[in-house]
């Protein structure tokens, strides 16, 4: 019995010893070793600090962005050099276009500034329920770099998209998705499926899905250059619509963390000044083309043709462009940034991308004009030659034959105008609808507009035809007296169909 007891005691001590050894090996010893390593690191750091010189920087900022070509200036050596001259160290962080993470990084103080498309900023702000960043200037606008490509025989124009089998193959949370949403929101496409998007990993995956698709599919491939040109090598395909046809929807901007902006407004202003100066130094096409090719060197080699396609699809915003967009050059016919934000928010909301407007109807909460206003008051110019506001597209005046030869693009989504029976007078509700249409037409400056009137079937048919035209003419007069060029619009009367509605068809001159 005594022997058994001694054996049990010995076993217990053995177990306790084993437990102690495990604790020592996996807890005590590592902690002691880590403490020793930390002491050595502190000692080493103290030596380094004692024998190091001062940094040539007074400020350090981290700026989040992705590989989009429009951000080439931000990645340029010249921009970095200009900041260094002002004792500002720049750390660029490529987050692979993870916009929610980018906004969270600003909110948490990991980034002080970032590049965003305005739509991505609105969407990320709506999803997070916070607006930690504010726009301080515009960088560029997509002008044709993104496009919808489809089979000619299946989808001739935007109106042909109006089908329950139409599907948009695109990269989610990209400018291509924005392009699709802009088209869906602006045109009469009520027959589209509730979920018409087919997600792709990236534009290369869109190309792969096209390669697997049957001929004359109703799939629409939405992607950007140089992948657009890759698809167009097939003569059976064509561009249904691209981002050169509208304005103010796919716009890139530079934002600042609000806390950083409040604490260090002079640093934000210097970053903006250096950006505009670097942009000015790359203002000539050959300089920008070379920068584009250099910028793409780390990811994909661009030949001259591909670089030119990218260059042609992006409109960079210089200092004067920014003054105009922020309302500091009131006589310049460009969109105000507040209108851009409202229009983009409306598109995102109407197409279900966001549940609510993060600005609560106050677009000025998403931008800050103080930096640009300071530059204007200081008479800032980035170079010796004065910059000009970029010219806006203008449509030539057409004769009757040319109007008849216009190629229909699509029918705008406009609520029905109300006319009294047998009358062509616009009531207050109809005038409000037309005011919205005027704003809509200004975002599609590259298309002509045919205004088609209608009338009832009862009574004298010839009189009804005249009434249909008179209603179209009344609408035309309202549009042209409220800012739409008379050269863009033409009123016609359709054969009466029993409706009092007026339709608006966008058209383009045949190539």
Image: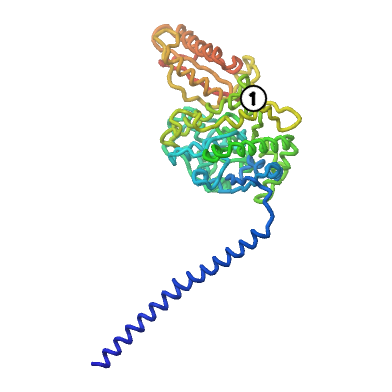
294 over 405 or under it: above or below: below
176 or 23: nearer the viewer:
23
Query: Which residue is denoted by mark 1 in the rendering?
Result: 392
Mark 1 falls on what kind of element?
loop
Q: Position of residue 337 (x, y in %)?
A: 55, 28
Number of numbered discs: 1
442 over 7 or under it: above or below: above
54 or 313: nearer the viewer:
54
Q: Position of residue 61 (x, y in %)?
A: 60, 45
46 over 420 or under it: above or below: below
Q: Which residue: 48% across, 8% down?
A: 466
Using the rendered image of the protein, determine whether residue 58 is visible from the camera's viewpoint: yes
Q: From this viewpoint, which residue is outermost toward the left?
A: 1
Specify the quadrant of the image occupied by residue 303. Answer: top right
441 over 1 or under it: above or below: above
Q: Which residue: 26% across, 89% down?
A: 5
Q: Which residue: 60% across, 33% down?
A: 138
Q: Position of residue 80 (x, y in %)?
A: 68, 44
Q: Position of residue 393 (x, y in %)?
A: 64, 24
Rendered-image quadrant of the C terminus: top right
Using the rendered image of the protein, determine whether residue 100 is visible from the camera's viewpoint: no
């Amino acid at each position: 019995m005594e022997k058994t007891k001694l054996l049990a005691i010995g076993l217990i001590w053995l177990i306790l010893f084993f437990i102690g050894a495990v604790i020592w090996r996996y807890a005590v010893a590592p902690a002691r070793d880590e403490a020793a390593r930390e002491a050595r690191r502190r000692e080493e750091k103290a030596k380094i600090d004692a024998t190091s010189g001062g940094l040539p920087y007074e400020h350090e900022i981290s700026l989040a962005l992705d590989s989009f070509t429009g951000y080439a200036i931000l990645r340029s050596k010249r921009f970095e050099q200009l900041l260094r001259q002002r004792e500002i160290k720049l750390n660029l962080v490529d987050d692979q276009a993870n916009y929610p993470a980018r906004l969270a990084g600003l909110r948490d103080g990991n980034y002080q500034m970032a590049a965003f498309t305005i739509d991505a900023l609105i969407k990320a702000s709506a999803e997070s329920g916070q607006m930690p960043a504010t726009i301080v200037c515009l960088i560029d606008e997509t002008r044709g770099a993104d496009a919808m490509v489809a089979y000619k025989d299946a989808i001739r124009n935007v109106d042909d998209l109006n089908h329950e089998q139409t599907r948009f193959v695109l990269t989610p949370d990209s400018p291509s998705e924005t392009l699709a949403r802009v088209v869906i929101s602006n045109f009469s496409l009520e027959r589209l499926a509730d979920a018409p998007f087919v997600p792709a990993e990236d534009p290369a995956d869109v190309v792969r899905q096209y390669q697997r698709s049957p001929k004359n599919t109703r799939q629409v491939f939405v992607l950007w250059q140089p992948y657009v040109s890759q698809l167009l090598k097939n003569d059976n395909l064509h561009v249904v619509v691209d981002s050169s046809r509208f304005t103010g929807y796919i716009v890139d901007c530079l934002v600042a963390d609000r806390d950083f902006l409040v604490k260090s407004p002079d640093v934000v202003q210097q970053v903006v000044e250096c950006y505009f100066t670097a942009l000015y130094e790359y203002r000539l096409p050959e300089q920008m083309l070379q920068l584009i090719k250099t910028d793409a060197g780390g990811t994909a080699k661009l030949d001259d043709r591909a670089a030119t396609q990218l260059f042609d699809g992006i409109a960079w915003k210089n200092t004067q462009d920014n003054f105009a967009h922020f309302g500091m050059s009131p006589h310049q016919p460009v969109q105000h940034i507040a209108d851009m934000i409202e229009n983009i928010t409306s598109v995102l909301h109407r197409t279900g991308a966001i549940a609510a407007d993060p600005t609560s109807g106050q677009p000025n909460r998403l931008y800050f004009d103080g930096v640009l206003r300071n530059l204007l008051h200081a008479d800032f110019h980035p170079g010796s030659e004065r910059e000009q506001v970029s010219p806006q597209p203008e449509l030539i005046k057409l004769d009757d034959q040319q109007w008849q030869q216009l190629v229909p693009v699509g029918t705008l989504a406009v609520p029905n105008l109300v006319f009294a029976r047998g009358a062509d007078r616009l009531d207050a509700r109809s005038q409000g609808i037309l005011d919205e249409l005027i704003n809509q037409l200004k975002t599609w400056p590259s298309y002509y507009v045919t205004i088609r009137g209608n009338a009832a079937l009862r009574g004298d048919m010839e009189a009804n035809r005249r009434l249909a035209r008179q209603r179209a003419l009344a609408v035309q007069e309202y549009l042209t007296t409220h800012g739409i060029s008379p050269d863009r619009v033409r009123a016609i009367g359709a054969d009466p169909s029993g409706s009092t509605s007026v339709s608006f068809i966008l058209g383009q001159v045949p190539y």
